[in-house]
Image: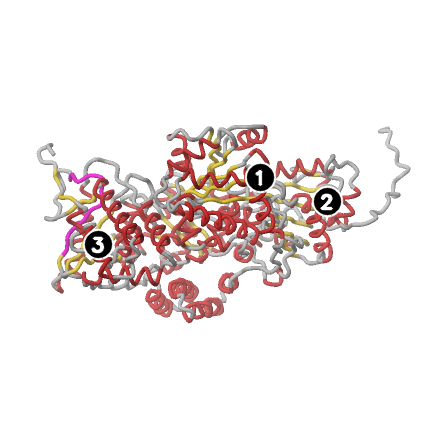
Amino acid sequence: MLGLDIKSLGQRAPMASNHPRDIFMGLPNKEYGYEYPRDVQSEVWEKWYESRHKRNVVIKMNTGSGKTVVALLILKSLIGEGIAPAVYVAPTPQLVTQVRREAEKLGIAVTEDEDDFHFMDGKSILLINIHKIFNGMSKFGIGSDPGIEIGSLLIDDVHACLESVKQQFSITVSRESDGSDVYSNIVEALRPAIPPHYAQLFTRVVDEGEPGKMFLVPFYVWQDEIDRIGRVLRQSLEEKTRVFNLPLVEDDLRFCNCVITDKKIEIAPKCLSADVIYGFRNAKRRIFLSATLADDGVLATALGLEKEDLKPIITPDKAGDVGDRLMVFPQAINSEVTDEEVASELKRLSKLYNVAVIVPSRKRAQWWEDKGYATVVATTENLNEVIERLRRGHVGLVVVVNRYDGIDLPGNACRILVMDSIPAFQTLYDAYLGWSESDQHRILVDQAQKIEQGIGRGIRSSNDYCGIVFMGRKLADILVRRKGAKYFSAATSAQYFLSKELWEMLLQVKSAPSAKDTIELLGYVLRRDEDWVRPSKSAIEGISYDAEAHVAEEVWALRRAFDKAKFGEYEQAAKLVEAVANENSSCGNLEYAGFLKQIVAEYTHPTSKLKAQEILLSAHKWNRNVVRPQEGIKPRKLQYDPTDQAQKIVDMMRNEFDDANDYLLKLENIFSMLVFGAEDTSEEFERAIFDIARLVGIDSSRPEKETGVGPDNLWAIGSGKYLVIECKNERTHDKICKYDCNQLIGSCEWFESVYAPHGHTYIPVLFHKSSLFEFDCFPKEGTRIVTQRKLDMLIDAIRTFAKEMVTQASYSSAKEVANLLATNNLKADKIVDSYSEGYRKVVNGKR
């Protein structure tokens, strides 16, 4: 006998109340400090309890406001109502561990084993990371296979989770790690269908392996070849790990975007079919918990939620429960401040405080290491160890690689948080959109939200405080010039704009504050200076959460169109997107309207290829960066009068920039992209060459990008003369190779066929670290080279011109602008002589 006392069988007392707050108060084994819930927690529980019968509920709470406790008690309440099993989903394994610790402090039964009896029996909560549920071999079921049943599903940090889900709902084939056979099989399946006007780019990416270039497979090629592509994927990936993802996107392959680089191929759908996971699709209750970010579009595009699911969003009554943050941006208020000057000041402060620097890549982390600023670099391998060190005591300056969410640095673990550079694009397609400027609004919103997630790592309660330092020209362009901060949540936005008032005060005292001057402002928050703390608290204490969802109409339309197209209702899908495209065009937002028109063409192609091409041609008139039609696009002719150069600058300053500082910020952002020797930067570099011409009043175009053939850049410098430009900034060898030489020659031949018949002339220009051609090269006579030295001279001249123009406030007078252009050798017809040099050639092994 086991000695069980079975006399009490069937006599268990019913729970007195199933309200989360009552459950919390009745928990018998809570640790000290959990005697009473916070007001914000009680407010959320009350509102949720009133809406608990809704299948889909969205809850928003500030970072550090006790979201984990709220979530655990909601699931505990649902279990009490018999809506079990209950699953708690977090973005990362690290956060799963944090949730488990919180549950243990509350005395709530949890498990990380999906086969645990108590979980299956509805007695404990399953804790898993997002990858466990959303994968092609999910134990929670794929398609009609039910897998593990879910009664109540709660996804915490839903925006962070969905970034991981996007990765799961894509197929990425690495040319190196997955073997060239998979990459080659896909490429060769597409090759016969590549139209002539895409052949040049396809060759540069796939055959020549040119780094930094991206090739978006035209949708009409992709759709026409989808049966072959599907077979290739199934056969090629059968024994590869990527089969883990294939079942998630297999039914949506026809409307996937396929982007190819020299290193990998990425295939991903326009929206995600999260319902392919049986457990997600059939869960009786689904709760989505989020920080207070300003855009909720991803809840539609990734999860398929409808408008009624977001009415209302549950929030606490007030939003002032966020920690205190003072934000500074040395390079935004003085464009001459260098990264080194900012980093030196941070290194000095790291002797007193823990400083966490979030960087987008391992390469940027290497800069902090090589310069001697970093105490330690935290990567995936040592992240938990480094965070634990920060929590235990003083470490110094810690560089964290690409972790904008999923880590908590409370109190002294992080008193200064640095956001260095813009977050990296999560997908190749996002990177393509970022460089093509086809969907800039969404990209800007995504970047702003990622930045806000990052700067939230340093405050974990309303009593916490942290100084925030923004760093980098690109970040200045996003937050200041392009007003990306308006996409912050209400509390973060209030803190940002209060901090900007301090910047203005500093500028009144010093017209060009040093990095030290600006970073010294952090002393107000670090010393808990009452003159800062009082207005800071006042700025957020009256702020209320916004219970309305913020999803643009075109996002709803794109989601519904995707769902229609998935089930073969192509005409209805096209009409949905066409309506918002026309609305955007009527508002003058032509570039975005053109991008939407391209999607209309994609949904039209399955039923009428001819009509799809006609739509695509009209889209190209609004946005020259969208996919080109099958017949290609005629190059637009640049016509330029050099006497207009100064007036173009005057008009641009009046129409495009809020003030002169915006112009300087834009220039500095462009200068940051003009880098020789950096990998995967050719797209940025070519775009920067295009922009730099326009910002000094020179007409320019990108023929290869716009039409598929021709040079990287074309500048019109007056009197019927042009610069035919090829950019090879990524080259690291000390001679110009035959391939690069021939590419420039090919671009010159393009010019001779398109422009020369009309009496125009040209100068071949190559951006390259070397001016020395290999012995087997035969460059065109008169070819000019822009080396690093000449590029630096050009940048210095433009920077001097811009500062003189701004200082003298002469940008309203074309005559004065013209004088400054001449003084700095920036007149269109003089610029090539001043900032390029002639070439040399190896002859008989000698230079």
Mark closest to the chain's N terminus, 1 or 3? 1
Residue most extreme to the left: 844
What is the x, y in percent for residue 640? 20, 63
**Nearer to us in this view, 230 or 644:** 644
What is the x, y in percent for residue 835? 19, 46
Mark closest to the chain's N terminus, 2 or 3? 2
Q: What kind of element bears circle 2? A: loop
Circle 1 or circle 3, nearest the eye: 1
Residue at numbered disc 1: 528
Left of 465 or right of it: where is 813?
left
Q: How many numbered discs, if any?
A: 3
Q: What kind of element bears circle 1? A: loop
Circle 2 or circle 1, nearest the eye: 1
Rendered residue at 31%/62% (across/down):
630
- Provide the residue span drawn in magenta: 762-773
Residue at numbered disc 2: 37
Rendered residue at 50%/34% (across/down):
355
For residue 821, the mark is 3
Q: Is residue 605 visible?
A: no
Rendered residue at 37%/60% (across/down):
220
**Nearer to us in this view, 783 or 834:** 834
**Nearer to us in this view, 704 or 59:** 59
Mark closest to the chain's N terminus, 2 or 1? 2
Q: Is residue 264 magenta?
A: no
